[in-house]
Amino acid sequence: MSDVVEEGFDEGQAWLTIDGERWAAERIIHHLGAMLADPRRARMEAVLKRRLGSVALAVEDLHHSHNGAACVRTAEAFGVQDVLTIEGENAFPLFDSEADAGGVRKITKQTQRWVSFHRQRSSAELRAFADARGMQLWGAAPQGAATLADVPADVPVVLIFGNELEGLRRETQAACDGVFRIEMAGFVESFNVSVSVGICLHTQMTRRRAIIDAPGDLPYQRQRALLARWIFEDVRAARPILRRLRTEGVTPE
């Protein structure tokens, strides 16, 4: 996961911005993709076809690194591409320099490499993110008026989960289109946050795929941008290779 490699796309093209320089995604795929074993690249392409951009995960001010890592691993496993982190008070564990990096990697199994993170500082920024993409916000809370079954699957949604101690903040709940609960049959009132994420994502992703009648819904150009990033981050010495290509006359775009 790199702060200086960003993917971008529009209807007609896809690109990577690497250390401030923009490269066409197809250039990266052509030159660096040739260095991957065929099964490795084929696996990347197959996974991209099962990615959903219409269901996103958001987590707010998590305290414990193992919970953040488990949420990311769960999201990636179910095919979520976008993970939003609201960091009003606490840095998300994967971005916290004081977190147990080795322990985090052990839990995530490096799945953070395959998702797209969107960092926000407030529920207002989260609301703006959703509005810009035509998505509804649905927050998880034990006192929610709706149930998980009430969360719409016929529109794109962001599912939001609060931290381990306080749950979802009131201002974040107020920014949501709806607040839902996971119905319980026992004495406890709530699950661990990573368990809640797993239950809700599995349910919502299954329902969404049934409605769109497809395993994934990422636009083609976004798939190409992501494939380029995945290849770039998978190839050792990718940066020196690109610098050599520039000296040989290969243009970035």
Image (tube, helix red, strand yellow):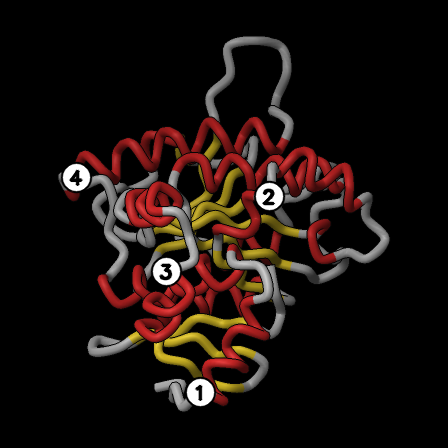
List the single residue furthest toward the right. 98
Taking 162 as reference, is 48 left or right? Answer: left
- Give the mark nearest the N terminus, 4 or 2: 2
- Give the mark nearest the N terminus, 3 or 1: 3
- Give the mark nearest the N terminus, 4 or 1: 4
Taking 230 as reference, is 46 left or right? Answer: left
Please give the label number shown on residue 110: 2
Measured as percent of width and height from the top left, residue 32 is found at 42, 65
How far apart, in angstroms, are the residues tagged by discs 1 and 2? Answer: 34 Å
List the single residue furthest toward the front. 248
How far apart, in angstroms, are the residues tagged by discs 4 and 1? Answer: 49 Å
Determine if residue 51 is in view. no
- Give the mark nearest the N terminus, 4 or 3: 3
Residue drawn at the location 35% of the way across and 72% of the way down: 25
The amino acid marked with disc number 3 is Ala
How far apart, in angstroms, are the residues tagged by discs 4 and 2? Answer: 31 Å
Residue drawn at the location 39% of the way across and 44% of the way down: 40
Q: Which residue is mark 1?
A: 248
How far apart, in angstroms, are the residues tagged by discs 3 and 2? Answer: 23 Å
- Depth-wise, is mark 4 or mark 3 nearer the camera? 3
Please give the label number shown on residue 211: 4
